[in-house]
Image (cartoon, coloured by chain):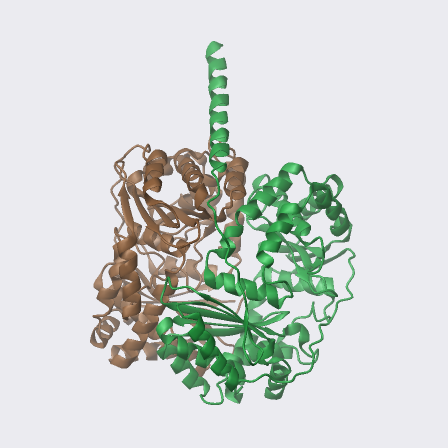
Chain colours: A green, B brown
C-alpha cells in the first residue's frame, strides 16, 4: 500500500517537473531584434521596387507582381492567361527565339519563370551574382518583349492540356476545383476553371490581347535581394526603365461575386480507395476590420501547424480518421470574399464520420465559443514566430511587395503583429457567430460516400 | 510528419560546384562549422550565421527503411510518428503546445530509406527549450494512442501510394529493380505490414537503432556556440553509450538482362527508366551527379530540350541520381510523362538515343562547363537557409560519414572530363542493367 502511494507521488512529482521545466524554459527572455524598415524606390517608368542588400551569399533573387490574373480572362477565352504565363518564358522574345532563350538561361545558370493565379501575374528569377546582369536582361526581355511564337504556342497548349488531364487523376485537385465552382458558381470568374476544350480554342491573338491589357511597368512591383550594391542596382534598373517605358492601358476592373451561402453537397464518384473532402463556405475580405480575429479563429479551428487545434485533435489524433485535415480562411477584394474551407482525406467508409466531425466541431465553436486558453495559445504561436518574417531578406522583400500589391501598407507585418496582439476573446466569439455558418456548408466529396 | 516525397526532384543528391563562387562559399562554410563530440558517441555540428536571432535545429538518426525486416516494413516511419506522442511525463498536447506557443516554425520530421530526422526552426532565445523537448522525444517517447496513429499512417499510405499514380510507379520500380536489397520496399512500408505493426516491434527497433553513435544533431543560425555546447551536453550527454548493431545488408545480385514491368492505375502514361549504380563516395557516383545535369537539369539540358521541345513527346522529364537512398548501391532514374498520342516505345527510343550520344562521347567541354556552372548555382541556393544547411550537414554526416563530403564534392567534380562521362555512360547505361516500368490503365 505504501509502495503504491509512493509510486503515485513519484509520478505526480515527475509530471510536475516536466511541465514546470517547460514553463521555465518558455520564460527565456526574447533576444532584442529591431526589424528593418522597408522603403520602396519607384523607377521613371513607374515600377515600384523593394530592394534589400544581402551579401551573405554570392546570389541574387527577384520576384515581380504584375496586376492581372485569371479572373480577368474573357469567359469565352478561358486559359488565355495561363498560356500567356507559360509563353513569356517559353515563347521566345523579339531578339532571341525560344531555343536561344533556353541556351542563354542554361549557359548563365539562370532560373526564371512566370505564373498566373486568380488575382496575380507573377515572375521570378535567380542566379549567381556574377550572372546577375544577364539574369535581369533576359528576365525583362521575356517580360516586355515576348514573341509568343506559334510553334511554342502549340507545345505550350499540349503540355497544359496534359497537365489538366493529370490533375483529374488524383482526388485532391478535383476537390479544390469543384469546391470553388460550387461556392462561386461554375461561370463566375472566381469559381470557373479553364477546361481542356477551352485551352484547345486559344490562339495567338487571344494571348497577345490578354498580354497587352496588363503588361506595363507601372503596374509592376519588383522585389529583389542578394549580393548587390543598392545604388548600383537602382542605376541598372533605371537603364531598363528607359528601355521599357510605361504604357497607357485601360483600367483593370475587378469582377465581383454575387455568391451567397446555402447548404449544398456534391459527390464526384471515382474509384479511389480514399476520398478527398472539401467543406466550407465564403471567406472574408481584405478590408474587413475583423481580419486578425478571423486569422486567430481559423488557427483555433483547424488552421494551425499544430496537432492540437480542434479539427486535428478530433479527426486525426483522437479518431485516427485522417492523415491530412486542415482549414484555411482566405480574404478577397471588397466585392468578392475569399473562401473558408476544410480539406481532408479519409478512406471511403469513414467519409460520413469525418463530415459529421467537421460540422459538429464547427457548431461547437460557434455555440460555445473558444476558450481564453485557446486564444492565448493561438496568439502566442503566431506572435512568437513573427520574427521568421525577417529571417531571409529575399522572402522579406517579396513578402512586402505582395502586401503592397494587395493594397496593404509597407509596414503591414508590424500592423499584423499589433492587430493579432489586440484581439479579445469577446471579439473572437462574436466573430465565430457572425462569420462561421455550420448550417450553410458546401460539401464536395471526390471518391465515394 | 511527412515522408520524403519520392516524386521527381526530391532525393536527388546532386550538389557540386566548379566555379570559384561556389568554391568560395563552401570554403567559408567549412571553416565556420564547429564539431562537438559527446562522450556517448553522438556528434553535433554547430554553425553561427545570420543576423536574425533564430535558428534551425535537427536531430537525425541513421535509421530508415533499410533497417527494417520483411514482414515489419514501415517501422522506422511509424516510430517517427510516435515521437510526437509525448513521453511518460509530457502529454502529446503539452509537447506540441510547448513548441508552437514558443514560436516554432516548420515543426516536422521525415523518414527516408536511410535516415529519420526531427527538425524545426525557433527563436534563438528558445534554444534550450528546443534541446530539452527534442532530447525527451528521442529518449523517452511512449507508445501513446498507438493504434489510432497506425490508422493515421494507413491513411497516409493510401494517399501517397495506393491512390497516387507516381506512388504506384515508384513502388513497382523499386520492387522490380531490387531482389535482395532492402531498397525494394517503400519507405512507408507494405500496407499489410503497416496495418499489423505492434507497439513492442517499435520499442525493440528503437532500442536497437536510437543509439548515440547513430545520431547527429545540428544547430544553424544566430546563437552563441559556447552556450549551445553546454546545453547540448546537459540534455543529450546522458543518453547511455551503446555499441551500434553491425550492419549486414544482403548484396544485390548483378542484373543480367533488361527488366520490364508495369504499375496499374487509371491515369495518364508515366514511364520510368532506371540503371543500377554504386552509391557515394564511389567515383562513378560523382560522375552521375554531372550526368544528371547534362541530361535533365538546366534549361537546355539534353532530355528536356530534345523530348519536350524538339520532339514534343513528353510534358516533362526529370532525372534523379541516388534513388531511393544512398546508404546502399542505388539507381539513376529517368521519369517521363508522355503526351497523348505518343507511345512508350517512342519515348523510350528517344531516351535511348540520347543516352547513346553520351556513350559516343558527344558531350564537349563547353557543355561540361555549362553543367558545372549550373551545378555550382544550385549548390549555393540549396545551402542558402539555416534549415537547408542544417539538413545537408546532418545528411552527409550520416550517409557519407563526414559532413565535409559535401564541402569537397567540388574538388572531385571539377576533374571529371567528357571522356570520363562517356566511360561511365558506357559502363552503366547497358541493356543488361536497365529497368523499365510503364503505367497502365
> Residue at position x 63%, y 63% from top?
A408
Q: Residue A321's quadrant in the figure?
A: top right
Q: Is residue A262 above or below residue A258?
A: above
Of residue A27 and residue B121, the one placed in the foreground of this image is A27
Q: Residue B230's quadrant in the figure?
A: top left
- Tell me if I can see residue B342 in this picture: no
- Tell me if I can see residue A116 in this picture: yes
Q: Is residue A179 above or below residue B78?
A: below
Of residue B273 and residue B361, the one placed in the foreground of this image is B361
Q: Is residue B313 above or below residue A397?
A: below
Q: Position of residue A110 (x, y in %)?
A: 40, 74
Q: Residue A277's quadrant in the figure?
A: bottom right
Q: Position of residue A302 (x, y in %)?
A: 62, 48
**Numbered disc total:** 0
Q: Is residue B332 above or below residue A30?
A: below
Q: Is residue A366 left or right of residue A401?
A: right
> Residue at position x 53%, y 88% from top?
A150
Of residue B144 and residue A244, the one placed in the foreground of this image is A244
Looking at the image, the residue that sits furthest to the front is: A231
Of residue A159 and residue A250, the one placed in the foreground of this image is A250
Looking at the image, the residue that sits furthest to the top is: A1
Q: Is residue B431 left or right of residue B318?
A: left
Q: Position of residue A256 (x, y in %)?
A: 74, 69
Q: Is residue B203 left or right of residue A149?
A: left
Q: Position of residue B46 (x, y in %)?
A: 33, 48
Amino acid at each position: 500500500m505504501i509502495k503504491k502511494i509512493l509510486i503515485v507521488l513519484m509520478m505526480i512529482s515527475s509530471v510536475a517537473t516536466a511541465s514546470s521545466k517547460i514553463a521555465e524554459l518558455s520564460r527565456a527572455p526574447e533576444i532584442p531584434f529591431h526589424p528593418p524598415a522597408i522603403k520602396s524606390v519607384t523607377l521613371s517608368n513607374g515600377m515600384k521596387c523593394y530592394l534589400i542588400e544581402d551579401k551573405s551569399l554570392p546570389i541574387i533573387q527577384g520576384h515581380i507582381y504584375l496586376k492581372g490574373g485569371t479572373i480577368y480572362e474573357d469567359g469565352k477565352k478561358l486559359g488565355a492567361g495561363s498560356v500567356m504565363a507559360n509563353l513569356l518564358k517559353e515563347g521566345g522574345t523579339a531578339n532571341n527565339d525560344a531555343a536561344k532563350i533556353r541556351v542563354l538561361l542554361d549557359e548563365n545558370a539562370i532560373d526564371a519563370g512566370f505564373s498566373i493565379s486568380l488575382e496575380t501575374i507573377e515572375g521570378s528569377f535567380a542566379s549567381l551574382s556574377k550572372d546577375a546582369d544577364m539574369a535581369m536582361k533576359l528576365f525583362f526581355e521575356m517580360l516586355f518583349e515576348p514573341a509568343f511564337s506559334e510553334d511554342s504556342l502549340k507545345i505550350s497548349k499540349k503540355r497544359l492540356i496534359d497537365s489538366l488531364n493529370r490533375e483529374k487523376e488524383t482526388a485532391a485537385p478535383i476537390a479544390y476545383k469543384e469546391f470553388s465552382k460550387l461556392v462561386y458558381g461554375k461561370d463566375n470568374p472566381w469559381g470557373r476553371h479553364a477546361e481542356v476544350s477551352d485551352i484547345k480554342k486559344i490562339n495567338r491573338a487571344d494571348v497577345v490581347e490578354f498580354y497587352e491589357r496588363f503588361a506595363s511597368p507601372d503596374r509592376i512591383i519588383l522585389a529583389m535581394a542578394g549580393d548587390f550594391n543598392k545604388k548600383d542596382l537602382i542605376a541598372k534598373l533605371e537603364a531598363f526603365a528607359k528601355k521599357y517605358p510605361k504604357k497607357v492601358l485601360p483600367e483593370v476592373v475587378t469582377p465581383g461575386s454575387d455568391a451567397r451561402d446555402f447548404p449544398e453537397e456534391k459527390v464526384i464518384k471515382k474509384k479511389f480507395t480514399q476520398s478527398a473532402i472539401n467543406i466550407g463556405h465564403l471567406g472574408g475580405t481584405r478590408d474587413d476590420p475583423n481580419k486578425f480575429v478571423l486569422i486567430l479563429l481559423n488557427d483555433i479551428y483547424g488552421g494551425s501547424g499544430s496537432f492540437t487545434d480542434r479539427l486535428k485533435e478530433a479527426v486525426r489524433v483522437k479518431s485516427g480518421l485522417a492523415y491530412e485535415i486542415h482549414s484555411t480562411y482566405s480574404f478577397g477584394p471588397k466585392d468578392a470574399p475569399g473562401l473558408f474551407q476544410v480539406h481532408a482525406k479519409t478512406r471511403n467508409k469513414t467519409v460520413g464520420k469525418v463530415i459529421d466531425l467537421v460540422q459538429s466541431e464547427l457548431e461547437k465553436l460557434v455555440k460555445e465559443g473558444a476558450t481564453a486558453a485557446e486564444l492565448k495559445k493561438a496568439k502566442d504561436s503566431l506572435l512568437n514566430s513573427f520574427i521568421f518574417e525577417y529571417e531571409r531578406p529575399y522572402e522579406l522583400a517579396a513578402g512586402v511587395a505582395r502586401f503592397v500589391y494587395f493594397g496593404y501598407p509597407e509596414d503591414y507585418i508590424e500592423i499584423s503583429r499589433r492587430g493579432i496582439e489586440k484581439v479579445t476573446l469577446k471579439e473572437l466569439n462574436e466573430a465565430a457567430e457572425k462569420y462561421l455558418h455550420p448550417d450553410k456548408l458546401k460539401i464536395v466529396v471526390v471518391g465515394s460516400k | 510528419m511527412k515522408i520524403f516525397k519520392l516524386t521527381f526532384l526530391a532525393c536527388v543528391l546532386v550538389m557540386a560546384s566548379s566555379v570559384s563562387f561556389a568554391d568560395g562559399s563552401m570554403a567559408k562554410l567549412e571553416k565556420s562549422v564547429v564539431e562537438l563530440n559527446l562522450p556517448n558517441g553522438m556528434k553535433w555540428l554547430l554553425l553561427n550565421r545570420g543576423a536574425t536571432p533564430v535558428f534551425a535545429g535537427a536531430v537525425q538518426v541513421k535509421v530508415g527503411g533499410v533497417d527494417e525486416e520483411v514482414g515489419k516494413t514501415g517501422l522506422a516511419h511509424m516510430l517517427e510518428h510516435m515521437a510526437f506522442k509525448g513521453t511518460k511525463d509530457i502529454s502529446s498536447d503539452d509537447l506540441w503546445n510547448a513548441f508552437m506557443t514558443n514560436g516554432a516554425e516548420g515543426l516536422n520530421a521525415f523518414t527516408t530509406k536511410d535516415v529519420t530526422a526531427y527538425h524545426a526552426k525557433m527563436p534563438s532565445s528558445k534554444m534550450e527549450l528546443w534541446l530539452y523537448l527534442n532530447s525527451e522525444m528521442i529518449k523517452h517517447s511512449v507508445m501513446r494512442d498507438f493504434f489510432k496513429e497506425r490508422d493515421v499512417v494507413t491513411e497516409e499510405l493510401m494517399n501517397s501510394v495506393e491512390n497516387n499514380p507516381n506512388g504506384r510507379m515508384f513502388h513497382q520500380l523499386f520492387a522490380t529493380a531490387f531482389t535482395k536489397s532492402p531498397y525494394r520496399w517503400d519507405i512507408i512500408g507494405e500496407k499489410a505490414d503497416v496495418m499489423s505493426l505492434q507497439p513492442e516491434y517499435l520499442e525493440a527497433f528503437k532500442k536497437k537503432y536510437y543509439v548515440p553513435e547513430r545520431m547527429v544533431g545540428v544547430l544553424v543560425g544566430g546563437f552563441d556556440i559556447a552556450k549551445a555546447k553546454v546545453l547540448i551536453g546537459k540534455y543529450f550527454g546522458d543518453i547511455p553509450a551503446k555499441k551500434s548493431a553491425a550492419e549486414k545488408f544482403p548484396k544485390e545480385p548483378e542484373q543480367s538482362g533488361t527488366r520490364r514491368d508495369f504499375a496499374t492505375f487509371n491515369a495518364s502514361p508515366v514511364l520510368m527508366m532506371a540503371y543500377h549504380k554504386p552509391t557515394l563516395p564511389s567515383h562513378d557516383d560523382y560522375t552521375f551527379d554531372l550526368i544528371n545535369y547534362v541530361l535533365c537539369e538546366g534549361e537546355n539540358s539534353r532530355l528536356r530540350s530534345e523530348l519536350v521541345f524538339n520532339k514534343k513527346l513528353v510534358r516533362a522529364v526529370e532525372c534523379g541520381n541516388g534513388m531511393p537512398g544512398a546508404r546502399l548501391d542505388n539507381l539513376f532514374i529517368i521519369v517521363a510523362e508522355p503526351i497523348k498520342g505518343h507511345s512508350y516505345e517512342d519515348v523510350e527510343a528517344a531516351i535511348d538515343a540520347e543516352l547513346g550520344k553520351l556513350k559516343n562521347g558527344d558531350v564537349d567541354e563547353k557543355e561540361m562547363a555549362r553543367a558545372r556552372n549550373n551545378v555550382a548555382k544550385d549548390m549555393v541556393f540549396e545551402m542558402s537557409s539555416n534549415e537547408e544547411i542544417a539538413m545537408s550537414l546532418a545528411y552527409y554526416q550520416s550517409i557519407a560519414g563526414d559532413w565535409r563530403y559535401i564541402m569537397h564534392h567540388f574538388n572531385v567534380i571539377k576533374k571529371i572530363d567528357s571522356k570520363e562521362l562517356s566511360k561511365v555512360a558506357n559502363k552503366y547505361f547497358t541493356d543488361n542493367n536497365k529497368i523499365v516500368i510503364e503505367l497502365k490503365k
